[in-house]
Amino acid sequence: MESAKPSVDLVRSLTDEHVLRALMRHRRLTRAELAVEIGISKPTAGESVRRLTELGLVADTGERTPGGRGRGRVGSYYALAPTVGVALAVTIAPEGVAAECVDVYADTVARAARPIDRPAQPRQVSSALRAAAAEAGAAAGQPARLAVVGAVDPVDRATGRLVHLPDAPFLVGELDPVAVLAPHVEGPVVVDNDVNWAALAERDSVGAEQLRDFAYLYLGDGLGCAIVNDGQVRRGRTGLTGEIAHVVTAGPGGRAVRFIELFEELGLRLNGSTAIDTGRLLASSAATQETIGTAVSGVVAAVIALADPQEVVVGGSWGPALIDSIRAATALMPRQVSVRPAELTSEPVLAGVRAEALRRLRASVTASSRWERTADRPT
């Protein structure tokens, strides 16, 4: 039995997607160059460029190849239209709200930031989020197709709202970034916890095939953990997987204590807050740091028992600095895995958010060629 041949519409759709992705990689190409890059005929490349130009996704740049005198015909350079849009990449952190507009070439074309107080109130964070998004969007001069948000607090998986948990060091109350950003973007608003984004950025920095099952411990002014299994973050029923602050571990003198309470007992919290004082912790005695390392090893033991990771990655403002104490304590555990500091140390949360915003933006642009073609087809 003969296999069914793909329809003409399907072939055209796939060709158009290949053309769009080639222009995302190379920024500008002639029709002849597109044909070579994709492996199609020049007439097919020309027809695809014509269709995409009519849809407003591709534009003639006005630049021409030299041509003439044995160089062949003059060719026109084509690029993605300036109006294909950008993605909004947002981080909500104790130091403030930052919003970036990223284009399809992975360039940051606009950025805005707003400070916030600590502990933060939802009304103030909403105002800062709204102002930063509006400023970045206006500076970009293009519509934001979508937004991706990384936030320091737990995120409800179903709604994208930030959830206030006991002893949370940052936001007092709940915040709805989806509702706040909806007027500033044309499409979806995706919200996730900052540690999850940092873990995905670590995965990509090492290589997705090499790092598929690991736990990412964030040890800074707050405490968090991301569980990555088969290359994907596991979020749980409500999105609260990895909230390790209340894991029971070993405290001073071997007493059982909730992880977050350890730092209060050691006098390492910021005044008037449950946030950990990183400066004071890093300046603490060797004995204190050994106690913290032991407590972290108890958290690691719980993570190993429940998630069975390939390795444990330690990030955050003070976690990597105490890696020797943590390793010494975890070496006494019955089940051993590699424990190492994070390789990506420069803005890992923003790196993860930006990468996802870029991925979704490119997918949105390529998909729009199918949507618009379908919408124009007579019923």
Image (cartoon, rainbow, N blue to C red):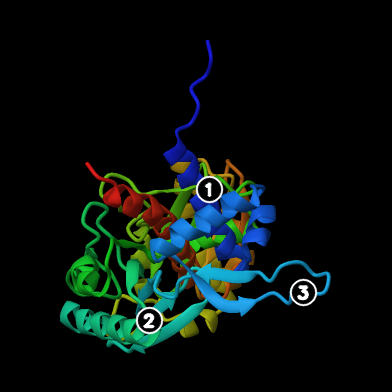
Mark 1 crowdedness (10 Å alpha carbons): few <14, some 14-19, many ≥20:
some
Per the image, label 1 sits on a secondary structure element best described as: helix
Query: Most extreme residue toward the top, as rendered?
Result: 1
**Marks 3 and 2: which is nearer the front?**
3
Q: Amino acid at mark 1?
A: Thr
| Left or right: where 190 falls relative to 67 | left
Which residue is at 53% across, 66% downward?
315
What amino acid type is highlighted by mark number 3?
A: Gly
Residue 98 x %, y %: 38, 81
Marks 1 and 3 sit apart, C-alpha to C-alpha, by 30 Å
Q: Is residue 349 something that shows in the picture?
A: yes
Query: Considering only order in the chain, which callout, 3 or 1, is on the residue closer to the N terminus?
Result: 1
Amino acid, disc 2: Ala
As drawn, is 131 to the left or to the right of 294? Answer: left
Q: Position of residue 377 (x, y in %)?
A: 29, 46
Report the Cα–Cα distance between label 3 and label 2.
50 Å
> Which of the two discs, 2 and 1, labels the residue nearer the N terminus?
1
* Labelled disc at residue 68: 3
> In the rendered image, which residue does mark 2 sit on?
98
Judge the density around disc 3: few (<14), some (14-19), many (≥20) Cα neighbours within 10 Å: few
Foreground mark, 1 or 3, reads 3
Q: Residue at x 50, y 40 (%)?
A: 11
Q: Which residue is under mark 1?
A: 15
